[in-house]
Image (cartoon, grey):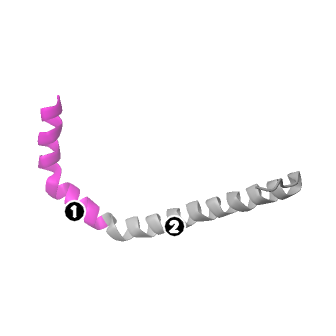
Amino acid sequence: MEKLSKGRVEERKRKSRGKEMYKLVLNCILKFTYMKKTYRNIVYLLEKHKSVFFIKDTQKN
C-alpha cells in the first residue's frame, strides 16, 4: 500500500466519520418512525402478555 500524506489520511478519516454519522442518524430516524407506527401494537402486546411476563419474572426469582 502506498504511503499517504498526513493531509490525505485526515481527509479520509473525516469522510468516513461523516458517513458513519449519516448512517447513525438515518438509522435513528428509521427506528423512530417504525417505533411510532408499532408503538400501539407493542403496548397492546405488552398488555396481552403481561401475565406471561409476570410468570417468567417470578420463576427467575
Q: Is residue 6 left or right of residue 56?
A: right
Tag shown at residue 44: 1
Q: Is residue 38 above or below residue 8?
A: below
Identified at 17% across, 32% down, the residue is 60
Tell me which amino acid carries mark 2.
Ile
Q: Which percent across, then down, holds residue 7? A: 88, 55
Q: Which residues are magenta?
A: 40-61
Quarter in which the N terminus is drawn: bottom right
Tell me if residue 28 comes above or below residue 49 in the rendering. below
Q: Return the mark for residue 29.
A: 2
Q: Is residue 52 above or below residue 34?
A: above
Considering depth in this image, is 3 or 24 the residue closer to the camera?
3
Q: Nearer the viewer, residue 30 or 40?
A: 30
Q: Quadrant of residue 33?
A: bottom left
Q: Position of residue 17 (x, y in %)?
A: 69, 57
Q: Secondary structure at mark 1?
A: helix
**Separation of disc 1 and disc 2 at Cα?**
23 Å
